[in-house]
Image (spheres, rainbow, N blue to C red):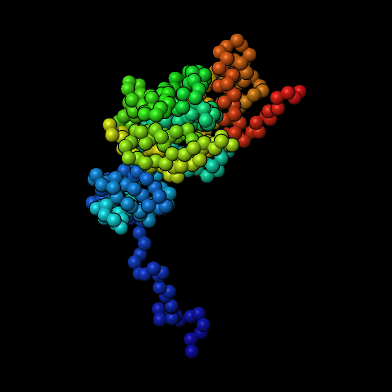
């Protein structure tokens, strides 16, 4: 009789079979030499609308890409059934390096970061001059997000028949942001066509339209792209806010060349992914002033030696105060500082 633990051979050892079969795992990925290039035009519950070889194809992602790794505007490579026929699926196997990436965070001080659109070169910030009232803080957030993404910006002001555009545009003169002003009539949208019109400013580019619900984004898209059929919402008479009509981003080809990407109406745009220095850099007129600030300055109201306070104390353009207030509100949110409470009118 053999003593326990001695004189063992291979017959005494039980080998547990490897789960998932006997095929060993490897870090080497298939080359997919026959993969076809495509452009992602829409995302819907794990399915991707892709334009490949002139055909609209429905695709899923390969396992190695994980979830959430593909967004509208991505340039991808596909394998599988590329016929575009009903009930067929292709597979996205790789995503090309992105030239730009528009992102948002769930909070200003961090939170979950989400990619919105890839490879767009222009962010069109759509805001109504009335009904709903323009919100400069949202516009400023869009400008910062575009700066972070490396995108150009364009202001598109709608409903100019309800309010003049000049007072609003005056606040953005120091930034040299191009702007187009539109209004809807019974027969057309004024400001859409002609020299300097919106159609001309979008031609040949990949542009993202972003703004609050109810400002007229879908109306513009339907006019720019025949048969787009984007749902048009209305502004709530009680809250003054629009109803979400677009539920996901979609890229639409412009008849004259280029793409326009319609995004869902946004209520907030967190900047937790943007460095504080980049928030300031998005306001070049104020960034130049802050170069005179002492090292470590927060640039918030009352910061010791802040050059912004010095500039405000001097006789200057009255618009400067509004610009500084906007920057400081963004910085306060980004730094997690509490903004000073505003006293109701008529109180001491």
In-image side of 244 versus 96 (left or right): right
Is residue 5 visible to us here? yes
In-image side of 298 versus 75 (left or right): right
Please tell me which residue lies in front, 178 or 76: 178
Is residue 152 visible to us here? no
- Say which residue appears at 40% left-offset and 70% top-offset: 18
Vertical placement of residue 246 versus 85, above or below = above
Please tell me which residue lies in front, 162 or 337: 162
Res 186 quadrant in image: top left
Please tell me which residue lies in front, 330 or 172: 172
- Say which residue appears at 39% left-offset and 68% top-offset: 20
In percent of width and height, residue 57 lies at 29, 50
Residue with the most extreme right position = 348
In percent of width and height, residue 90 lies at 30, 54
Q: Which quadrant is home to the C terminus?
A: top right
* Count of numbered circles on the image: 0
In-image side of 311 versus 260 (left or right): right
- Say which residue appears at 30% left-offset and 58% top-offset: 87
In percent of width and height, residue 320 lies at 56, 17
Vertical placement of residue 342 versus 261, above or below = above
Residue with the most extreme bottom position = 1
Residue with the most extreme top position = 315
Please tell me which residue lies in front, 63 or 123: 123
In percent of width and height, residue 104 lies at 49, 39
- Say which residue appears at 38% left-offset and 35% top-offset: 221
């Amino acid at each position: 009789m053999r003593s326990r633990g001695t004189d063992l051979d291979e017959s005494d050892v039980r080998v547990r079979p490897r789960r998932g079969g006997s095929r060993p795992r490897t870090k080497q990925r298939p080359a997919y030499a026959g993969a076809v290039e495509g452009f992602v035009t829409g995302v819907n519950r794990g399915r991707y609308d892709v334009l490949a070889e002139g055909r609209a194809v429905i695709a899923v992602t390969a396992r190695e890409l994980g979830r959430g790794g593909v967004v509208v505007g991505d340039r991808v490579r596909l394998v599988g059934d590329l016929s575009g026929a009903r009930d067929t699926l292709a597979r996205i196997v790789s995503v090309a390096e992105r030239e730009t990436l528009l992102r948002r965070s769930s909070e200003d001080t961090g939170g979950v970061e989400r990619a919105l659109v890839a490879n767009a070169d222009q962010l069109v910030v759509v805001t109504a001059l009335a009904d709903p009232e323009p919100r400069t803080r949202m516009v400023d957030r869009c400008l910062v997000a575009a700066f972070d993404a490396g995108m150009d910006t364009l202001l598109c002001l709608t409903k100019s028949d309800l309010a003049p555009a000049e007072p609003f545009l005056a606040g953005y003169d120091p930034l040299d942001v191009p702007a187009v002003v539109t209004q809807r009539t019974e027969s057309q949208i004024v400001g859409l066509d002609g020299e300097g019109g919106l159609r001309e400013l979008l031609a040949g580019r990949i542009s993202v339209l972003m703004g609050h619900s109810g400002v007229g984004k879908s109306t513009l898209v339907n006019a720019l792209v025949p048969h787009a059929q984007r749902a048009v919402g209305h502004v709530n008479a009680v809250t003054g806010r629009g109803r979400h009509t677009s539920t996901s981003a979609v890229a639409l080809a412009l008849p004259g060349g280029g793409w326009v990407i319609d995004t869902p109406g946004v209520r907030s745009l967190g900047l937790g992914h943007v460095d504080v220095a980049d928030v300031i850099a998005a306001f070049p007129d104020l960034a130049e002033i802050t170069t005179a600030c002492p090292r470590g300055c927060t640039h918030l109201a009352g910061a010791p030696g802040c050059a912004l306070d010095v500039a405000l104390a001097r006789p200057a353009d009255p618009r400067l105060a509004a610009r500084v207030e906007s920057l400081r509100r963004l910085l306060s949110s980004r730094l997690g500082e509490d903004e000073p409470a505003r006293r109701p009118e008529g109180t001491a």
